[in-house]
Each structure stands twice: as structure tokens, then as C-alpha cells.
Amino acid sequence: MNYLSFEKTKEQNAIEMEFCIPFSKAIMSPMSDQLARICFMMLMNPEANIPELEESFIYRMLDSRLQCFTFKMSKPAKYFVSALCESPGDVVMYLTYLQYLASIRSRRDLDMEFVRNEFPVGFPGSEELHRLWLGQKVSRDHGSDNLLDYGTAMKSITKIPQK
């Protein structure tokens, strides 16, 4: 496996260039029937509660990790994105990519409509997500081997211009 140089963690646009742009070019797969039902329910009834999702580890992690980003998400969008994710790594990747989208679209509040519109043909499948995850790994002697864990490397996507 080819690791990125640890020096990438100090480049303010590294996450944008090494992760977000490749994510934007990923092969997308259509939604599963279950995900489509959740999407439809969240769009039609944004006040809906899904306790089994809200109590899940993935949802709680997503909700907690949002504090590291400069955008906010509606509850339906959080439900939906947590339903997309199968692992903590997936949560970090989707939130990072949504941060990138929030930045380039000048959006501070992301709702279900925004998420749906940004993924019109589907989402990266598990193999694509795995490829993207491996592509952001950095060689290191200490600290995280995930470029996505370095705030300095994310600076180019954390500023959300005013509309």
C-alpha cells in the first residue's frame, strides 16, 4: 500500500486534494431499498424519529464528531447519513466530504434535501469507501495514520464563505 507522506498533514489543502476530490469522482452505487425508505421517510416527514438509529453507536459517533466541523446537520440528515455508514471510518469520510461540499456550496446548515441533491446517482459502495479510506493513509512514527484526523490538513475546506 502506498502511504502519503506525513508532511501532507501540514498542508492546508491536503484533505481536499487527497480525499475530497477523489471522493467526488468515486464510483457510485444506487441506494439499497432500506436506505431509499429512510430517505423517503426523512424527506416526507422531517419530524420523524427513528429511535433504533438514534441509539446506535454510529449515530452517536456522527453526532459527537460533528463538533469537529463547521457545518450543522438537521436530524433527518443525521439519520440518513448514519444509515449510510457501516463503520466509524465511514462516518469520518462522509462528514469530511460533507464539510467539503458545505464549503464549496457556501452552506452552514445541511438538511436532507441538500444531502439527497449532492448524491443524485447514489453513494460509494463498500469497495469504493475502502479504496478512499486507504488513499488517505499517511506514513507516521507517531499519531494517527489517517490524514482525515489532522485539522491543519482540512483548513481549505473549513471556511464557509457567506452567500
Image (spheres, rainbow, N blue to C red):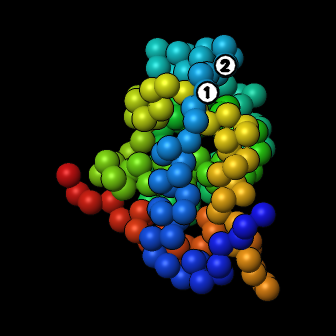
User: Closer to the observer: label 2 or label 1?
Assistant: 1
34 lies left or right of 30: right
Residue for point 79% across, 85% down: 141
In this rendering, the answer to whether 4 lies above or below 102 is below
The crowding category of the residue bearing disc 2, from other C-alpha atoms within 10 Å (few below 14, some 14 to 19, many at least 20), is few
Q: Which residue is mark 2?
A: 32
| Figure quadrant of residue 49 | top right
Count of numbered tags: 2
3D distance between C-alphas at marks 2 and 1: 9 Å
82 lies left or right of 140: left
Which type of secondary structure does the marked residue at label 1 adopt? Answer: strand
Which type of secondary structure does the marked residue at label 2 adopt? Answer: loop
Looking at the picture, how far across and down is residue 94, in whole percent?
58, 47
In this rendering, the answer to whether 163 lies above or below 49 is below
Looking at the picture, how far across and down is residue 13, in whole percent?
45, 70
Whether residues under marks 2 and 1 lie with C-beta atoms below 8 angstroms apart, the answer is: no
In the rendered image, is residue 40 in sight? yes
Q: Which residue is mark 1?
A: 29
Furthest residue toward left: 163
Looking at the picture, how far across and down is residue 5, in whole percent?
65, 79
Looking at the picture, how far across and down is residue 14, in whole percent?
51, 70
Q: Amino acid at mark 1?
A: Ser
